[in-house]
Amino acid sequence: MAVKVENNIFYLETQHTMYQIRADEYGTLLHLWYGAKTGENMEYLLDYPDVGFSGNPYEAGSCRTYSLNTLPLEYAAAGVGDYRISAVSVTHADGSTALDLKYLHHKITRGKYSIPGLPAVYADEKEAETLEITLKDTAKPIYVILKYGILEELDIITRSAVIFNEGTKPITINRAHSFSMDLPYGKWDWMHFYGRHAMEQQAERVGLLHGIQENGSTRGNSSHQHNPSMLLCEKGCTEASGFCIGALLMYSGCFQTQLELDQLDQTRVVMGIHPDTFSWQLKEGESFYTPEVILSCTTHGMEQLSWNFHRIIREHVCRGKYKLARRPVLINNWEATYFDFNEEKIWNIAKEASKLGVDMMVLDDGWFGKRESDTSGLGDWYVNERKLNGGLGKLAERINGLGMKFGLWFEPEMVSEDSNLYREHPDWALQIPGRAPVRSRGQLVLDLTRQEVRDYLYQSVSQVLDSANIEYVKWDMNRSISDWYSHALPDSRQKEMPHRYVLGLYELLERLTSAYPNILFEGCCGGGGRFDAGILYYCPQIWCSDDTDAYERTKIQYGTSFFYPISAVGSHVSAVPNHQTGRVTPLSARTVTAMAGSFGYELDLNQLSDKEKKEVAEDIRRFKQYAPLIHNGRYYRLSSPFQNNIAVWSFVSKDQTEVLVQGMIFFTEANRLRSIVRLRGLDRQKQYQLVETNFVCNGQALMEGGVLLPKAWGDYMPVELHFQEYTK
């Protein structure tokens, strides 16, 4: 059993970790421990000081050392004497805001809970257990059910909460975070991943300051600016050693992560829906479900934590035909043609790509409606036959005749004012009455909270998918959301819209992915603006960034790798000078960088020289050879592109018989020693041969001494070293 209860202490145990909670004598749910297994009740570490201006619950009588303002709480509520950040806050019908949650009862079941209308980790009865702890307010018939999913083998614990109103009057939920956790001891670094469009997932590690630190998004998506993930690391934690905790929110909308270092040097973390863009009226008998947070911790450094998250996402978040399968090598026409194409241009790109071993041709933006630029056509999901004479069916048939699959780009959530859809249904676009809307990329946002809008999108997209042999869909979203207002909601409930929008998106994605199980859906939001575990539940890969520059991609993909598996990362080789930076990098460097993902091309291969075409054919052959190792092996960050002149990573097979080292040396300097990189994850006793050379070395030497990287000649020089077990 992964969950056991002794004397009101809950032990949630995985293979290597223990999460411990206690319902104390007053019914307060205390957080005792999250860390390595100890086999002990860890309450002995708690201290109860008498802290000035930290009030005491009435039931504690004259005991001045018992205060909700200083105790480590499991799910912190507002208004009852805890002045730290809270996980939940409500306004009752009488206008009061206190919520005093006490333990009522609990339930343990086999298998993993699900969440109505929201993506969640899935697991069967042999793989997981669920703990539900029900808390009740002391004065009102308001209940909070804390849900814990324990996946023992994977060292994963999930958290979610349900708020239930059993009263006769509605309440308003002001704040409904998915979890909170108090850490009484430790000096912590916070590692988070910030950025901007075309420069996402920039890793930053900072020590906590006294007070509140936070990141999040109010943009309607999880955003390019901040990812819904965070690491807490002890000061000495490295890739290979030390204690760290990771939390990943499985949600694709406005979110908030807050950390507070309090007056006693205790740390509280909360994560969930952003309260600035959230409010929810909960009527009699109704429940509200929060999104899920995935938790893991380890004493073996950040790479072990990453493996835990990579595995849970690949095996228990991603679904369908492609969750573990090798993805087709694809070519996308966007940077090759932008909007200026016709059937023959696409055919010529596909024809050359097929000769070189590409598996799929993807037709990007511009194939539909009156779409000649980014100011028209969105919403009109029917073929522009001026560009594609004969329609998609004819084009797909021709491309299939080359032995290639055919894929298509959509942006269903958006509408152009210059479109038939907008002219017929202007009220379907988000727009506050009496205010001119904010345009972004010349487009407005459809109201996905409305069933008729979702039905229209399902029907129009389905008609396109049924019209041709389409085996891939790139689902894009190219703006942040503002002007939140729905004609389908009363004015008093407009602040529910941002969350209702995400629920509508998930419903639409569920309908489409269920109806077309053989189509590979790829998520996109101007690249990585919605790169989160919620989207991965429907789309097993996401276009990582609109920045295809190989040098900058090493940083973007480095940050992405802390939580998300390599198979989920859409990454392509593009033309030079690069269309985002103007930088010129060698084809070999662009290829090595793109191989650390779901590999493809974003250019017209006809424009390459014969020598480059031969190189591309060899690169594709090599990627297909390496793909099982890249997507199934353990991933190691061997250097940081933020701190070094090199970015080097490796993939090690599960049986430790094969190793692929790849990366890039950024800038060349004359008269200097070559760089050394120490490998990790090898069998110390095994002998490893560098493929196609006579170099043989044991695993211990390669890990302790390292390997010499090739001598750099020119900037942005690629690194690729392939080792296999050597047997005489």
Image (tube, grey):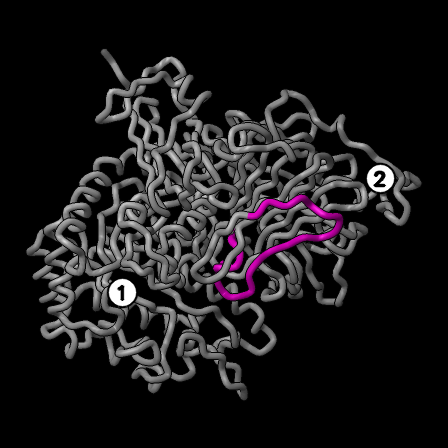
Is residue 345 shown left or right of residue 585?
left
Disc 2, SS: loop
In the image, residue 365 lies in the stretch drawn in magenta = no
Disc number at residue 571?
A: none
Q: Considering only vertical position in the picture, is 32 above or below 392?
A: above
The image quadrant where one finds the C terminus is top left
Residue 555 image position (x, y, % from top left): 45, 48
Can residue 25 be seen in this snapshot? yes
- Residue 236, quarter of the rendered image: top right
Q: Residue at x 44, y 43 (%)?
A: 561
In the image, residue 208 lies in the stretch drawn in magenta = yes
Disc number at residue 334?
A: 1
Q: How many marks?
A: 2
Q: What residue range appears in magenta? A: 204-228
Q: Residue at x 44, y 69 (%)?
A: 479
Residue 319 image position (x, y, % from top left): 33, 45
Q: Amino acid at mark 2?
A: Tyr
Is residue 580 shown left or right of residue 302?
left
- Residue corresponding to mark 2: 66
Whether residues under marks 1 and 2 lie with C-beta atoms below 8 angstroms apart, the answer is: no
Disc 1, SS: helix
The local crowd at label 2, few if under 14, some if 14 to 19, many if 20 or more residues have their Cα within 10 Å, is many
Residue 14 image position (x, y, % from top left): 52, 28
